[in-house]
Amino acid sequence: MLKRLDIRTCIECGLPYGHAAFSYHAGKSENGPSYWSDRGILCSVVCSTAHFERREREGDVMKAPAPNPLER
Ligand SMILES: [Zn+2]
């Protein structure tokens, strides 16, 4: 339950989508997030880098670019 995937929060730090600190495409929340993976959305380049580096260490590298989770 605690690990429930919620695409509306950053999957690294849990920052909610809509927060002022979230990084949006072209700076607007209605444009969707700037960063995401096949696991969910990422709030910033810092979390994006941390996410992909962690998955590289775990041997779980994303094979193909993920579709924008808000456009599914
Ligand atoms: Zn984050």
Image: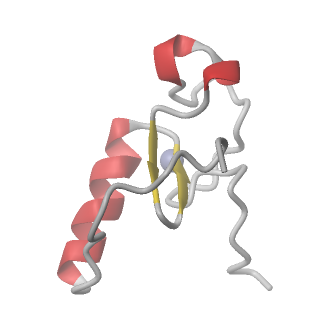
Q: Is residue 25 above or below residue 9?
A: above
State the scheme by which the image is colored: secondary structure
Residue found 55% across the figure and 34% down from its top: 33
Residue found 50% across the figure and 22% down from its top: 25
Q: Is residue 52 left or right of residue 22?
A: left
Q: Position of residue 19 (x, y in %)?
A: 70, 30
Q: Position of residue 9 (x, y in %)?
A: 67, 51
Residue found 53% across the figure and 13% down from its top: 27
Q: Position of residue 15 (x, y in %)?
A: 64, 46
- How many marks the image carries: the answer is 0
Q: Which of the two residues, 50 or 55, is positioned nearer the viewer here?
A: 55
Q: Is residue 15 left or right of residue 41?
A: right
In the rendered view of the protein, which quadrant contains the N terminus?
A: bottom right
Q: Which of the two residues, 61 or 23, is positioned nearer the viewer here?
A: 61
Q: Is residue 13 left or right of residue 60?
A: right
In this view, the residue farthest toward the front is 72
